[in-house]
Image: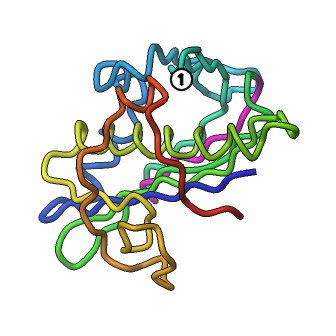
Amino acid sequence: MRYVRMAGTAPGRKATEIYPVISDFSRYPELTDAVRSVGILELDGGRTGCAWEVTFRRGILKWTEEDRYDAENHRVDFFLEEGDLDHLVGHWQVLDTDDGCRVIFSCDFDMGIPTLAEVIEPIAEQTLRDYIAVILRALVAGIVVDPYGDGDPSGGDAGGDDAEGADAEGADAEGAADGRLATGGGRR
């Protein structure tokens, strides 16, 4: 299982302005070729969700998730319903800060291939980080992306979840899709 946390600081912006943009998953395919499609779904019991198709290396990952929107707290929680992943749970949240707002993406995932987990999951983690960085930059003009969500762009332990972000240099989602990746990040 892998844990991914990323964040971005949007100077001079408010959570009420950014949350509707971040939570509009149907726009994500417009932002990067990596997200092939996102279909908005009405699930049983009045629940809502999305059907995702995302490029991963030379293939396509597909899954359906339930999404729980909390506009008051500027948060979307997501949970795997079914698909190519064995486990996926996480959230997007936008928080006001003294000088703007902070956008946080956090998730746990498991590709479901135990014998290849040490090879595939670090690549999947870095690919996800690259894609989220591209999406954040496309959705929020002027955002400063922190690829590990801890204030340390190198991925080391900065010791705090509330540290201010540092800019990540040019996430290359196309390179990630082609498999030209550096592995890294934390394990839980």
Residue 159, x across and y down, in percent: 50, 85
Taking the image as shown, residue 168 lies to the left or right of residue 72, namely left
Q: Is residue 40 magenta?
A: no
Please state the horizontal and vertical placement of residue 168, each as a whole percent of the image.
Answer: 28, 57
Residue 100, horizontal then vertical, whole percent: 20, 68
- Residue 166, quarter of picture: bottom left
Total count of labels: 1
Q: In the rendered view, would you say 95 is above or below 86?
A: below
Would you say the magenta stretch is mainly helix, strand or loop? strand
* Above-or-below relation of 49 to 96: above
Give the residue displayed 31% in from the left and 76% down from the top.
Answer: 164
Q: Could you tell whether 69 is left or right of 97 in the image? A: right
| Residue closer to the observer: 135 or 129 | 129
Give the image's coloring scheme: rainbow
For the C terminus, the image quarter is bottom right
Residue annotated with mark 1: 57
For this rendering, which residue is in front, 77 or 57? 57
Residue 98 appears at what percent x and percent y?
Answer: 22, 79
What amino acid type is highlighted by mark number 1?
Answer: Arg
- Residue at the limit of the structure toward the right, as seen here: 115
Side of 53 relative to 188 (left or right): left
**Circle 1 residues within 10 Å: few <14, some 14–19, many ≥20:** some
- Residue at figure coordinates x 27%, y 49% from the top left: 18
Span of residues in magenta: 73-82
Point 62% across, 49% down: residue:
90
Image point 37% across, 74% down: which residue?
151
174 to the left or right of 139? right
Secondary element type, mark 1: loop
